[in-house]
Image (cartoon, coloured by chain):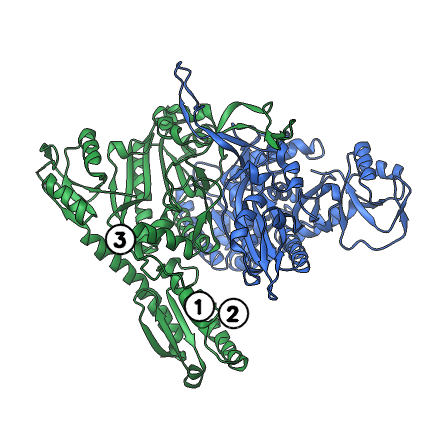
Chain colours: A blue, B green
Amino acid sequence: MGNKLTKRAEDYSKWYNELVIKADLSENSGVRGMMVIKPYGYAIWEKMQAELDRMFKETGHQNAYFPLLIPKSYFSKEASHVDGFAKECAVVTHYRLKNDENGKGIVVDESAKLEEELIIRPTSETIIWDSYRKWIQSYRDLPLLINQWANVVRWEMRTRLFLRTAEFLWQEGHTAHETKAEAIEETQRMQRIYADFAENFMAMPVIKGTKTESERFAGALDTYTIEAMMQDGKALQAGTSHFLGQNFAKAFDVKFTTKEGKKEYVWATSWGVSTRLMGALVMSHSDDFGLVLPPKLAPIQLAIVPIYKNSEQLDQINERVEKLTKNLKAEGISVKYDNRTTYKPGWKFAEYELKGVPLRLAIGPRDMENNTAELARRDTLEKEVLSQDNLVDRVKFLLNEIQDNLFQKALDRRNELITEVDNFNDFKNVLDTKGGFVSAHWDGTSETEEKIKTLTKATVRCIPLDAKEEEGICVFSGKKSNKRVLFAKAY
Amino acid sequence: MGNKLTKRAEDYSKWYNELVIKADLSENSGVRGMMVIKPYGYAIWEKMQAELDRMFKETGHQNAYFPLLIPKSYFSKEASHVDGFAKECAVVTHYRLKNDENGKGIVVDESAKLEEELIIRPTSETIIWDSYRKWIQSYRDLPLLINQWANVVRWEMRTRLFLRTAEFLWQEGHTAHETKAEAIEETQRMQRIYADFAENFMAMPVIKGTKTESERFAGALDTYTIEAMMQDGKALQAGTSHFLGQNFAKAFDVKFTTKEGKKEYVWATSWGVSTRLMGALVMSHSDDFGLVLPPKLAPIQLAIVPIYKNSEQLDQINERVEKLTKNLKAEGISVKYDNRTTYKPGWKFAEYELKGVPLRLAIGPRDMENNTAELARRDTLEKEVLSQDNLVDRVKFLLNEIQDNLFQKALDRRNELITEVDNFNDFKNVLDTKGGFVSAHWDGTSETEEKIKTLTKATVRCIPLDAKEEEGICVFSGKKSNKRVLFAKAY
């Protein structure tokens, strides 16, 4: 490794960019704004996918797959939806290349122009609701609970690895229900599942709330969000769940026959999380030495490094580690034994530290004599010497403890970064000096929201679900307000 | 259900199309040639993915993800590659839509034209090898064994659900090696893994062989294939593994430093299977009553249907089935208890028959008295009454037996459909009447292959790996040949 990371205190943004690349999570590709997710980063994403997929299926959802390309006419059917996405669409106009007749190489074959342009999905409501019209006839077909794992493209102008990329991977749930109440219940259920995943797997505390009108999904009546706080005091929207009302059912004419024999439009939800969560994960726990991963999402939970002077010693350690590894794996612990002879122990230590492996075990000749080993925690950087006989129990204990510790640290930090303010001077001051969430009264108008954004770059991240009713006055307009909302600068 | 399937003997092609739709596997979308994979079809695909992914990882491969879009200039770097794919490419030319100034709705914003067109990946060699240049420096970085699960687009003119679609899902492996021998070994290893998967999970016998020059992947020096035989006597290419030599390494300038300190180009392979396997699976085992699924890939292995006259009886059956289901699930059997009151037992029987569920269990009031149940096999349509006490053992036994039986039946049928011929009259006659593989001597030239194809629509499906050396003369040209190859009409 050698070349050190920029420190967070020096330049947080630079630290993040360097870390993502040095830890082999992802890198930029030759296509503007599109990233390559490298094997180590992808392995973390696969762990996330597996847990989320399990949670979705346990709550009755099924996976399906819909086309990548959406006819422009479908895309235009729901007015506010197309307004929200039209400015960042990749458009397919032709379906063939050819050799240029003037020897200029490969060119687009103009004779192969599509009659109707196709949009690469930025989200799939329109193509999916076009199918739902065929799938839904009667109340017996409802609820329809579908999820899709897919890539989407949004032509973002300023991109950052994981946080904002022109192509990203995500899941998008699309459900249809008999009643408004059921659809709202589903919207809230998925928000709870996202919060559960963020807190119990990513060890990332989140605040559950709803979005203001101006921050809602294009086409939604209500957007439920989970909001996380990064170490630099900026908020990150980590997942959203939308109550779509009957907007898409009406746009695509999806009606069902009720038990009473009436025809009614169905009620809809959609919800998604993306590879953006990878960025949130990196920024939640990592430090100046590199990545710090919560054990539940770490592709490698324990790295074992042999320390030896000759091949005889290595052979002995290999033999011992084989037994230890077997016991660890039997307990479901993901272990990597790194006995590559092409790298030195010190290099390997730095490598696993950089890559955020929760526990590292070193075994040398003296350990072989004493039946001991040295265990190092990534989160606290503490080391301990323990008996090999206690290894499995201790590793299990520490993996749980690290998971809990990371959550608690992130929670304490996040709570520190919520500040109640009651006037606009304090509001600006907190944002400029401390950052984080500013809990303030707001008059509920888009005008005030917009003005505050222009003056401070802070937006309403959410109206917390658990905001308590209290009399107050808007920090900006002085008008009446009955609850505090959370403002912050955001990723 | 009611509306019956077309019979295979009547119109095989129509039978297939109807079955795929009626069994809820997939359907056409509003986008020309692009399919929607419905939840039941996707659940089978997920089972396939899980097994393949496990096999890839067990042999040292890691997953990663590369951009969907490929700059035209990358795509053109390997000459034979671009020749092979240029005619069926979806081309992105713009990145924004806007409201038409003349009120014609949403139109492409001509001011948002890309400087260089982007191609939706039809396969990812070029974008991946552009990354490999950065990833590979030294022999220590090799072998590089990467797989990607992704969607790809090939603008096919004549499409059929699963078999040939403009967008499909697949996995594509891309590996880099120090030596030619290692790369060839990898190419062959992946062919063996594909054959193992086809035979032991899909219960579909395949012939391992290599492609002739004219049937090779665009950019490959050698293509290894697994070829299956469908019930109508047409062959289906089920998976391919390509030895790419140093073609892409040279096109993208990917060199490594050897142990001896020399700079050399790396050696490459790529290999893939796709949702086309879903079509192969359907056609391998299904019958005039519907789908027949091998137990190892069936989303539901056992469907349980209660038969009752009143809610009291249903309550009693529910309680009993809960216990039975618990025991079955403990053995890893995937069970669905269908006690919906909105459908009758007869409807459910037809439904699970159509959907190819390997085993169906019916329990009625008399069974409750006698501690029995009626078990029906989907493959043979045989029924048996058994004691509820023996259920778990019997189900486990039958699932294995059905898996084996499906393979054996498919193998017998396939072997029946291999015919050795020694002259061109017999060749044509066999193709016209019996179909299947025609095992014949061929002079090894593309000219002869092309002429035979024009006259008979049959192509060389493969040169079998186990073809025995024998003196012979080409059925068409009369020239010398030293082994038989397999011709067939193909999907």
Q: Position of residue B119 (x, y in %)?
A: 47, 30
Is the residue under label 2 in contact with that under label 3 (CB below 8 Å)? Answer: no
Residues tagged 3 and 1 counted as in contact (Cβ below 8 A): no
Asked if marks 3 and 1 fall on the same chain, the answer is yes
Of residue A196 and residue B459, the one placed in the foreground of this image is B459
User: Which residue is pictured at 41% across the width and 79% down the height?
Assistant: B388
The residue under the point 49% across, 76% down is: B323
Kindly state the secondary structure of the residue where label 2 is placed: loop
| Amino acid on which disc 3 is placed | Gln
User: Can you tell which mark lies on residue B348?
Assistant: 1
**Disc 3: which residue:** B231
Quadrant of image for the C terminus of chain B: top left
| Residue B212, percent from left and from top | 24, 34
Q: What quarter of the picture does the N terminus of chain B occupy?
A: bottom left
Residue that badge 2 annotates:
B340
- Residue situated in front as seen by the camera: A470 or B357: B357
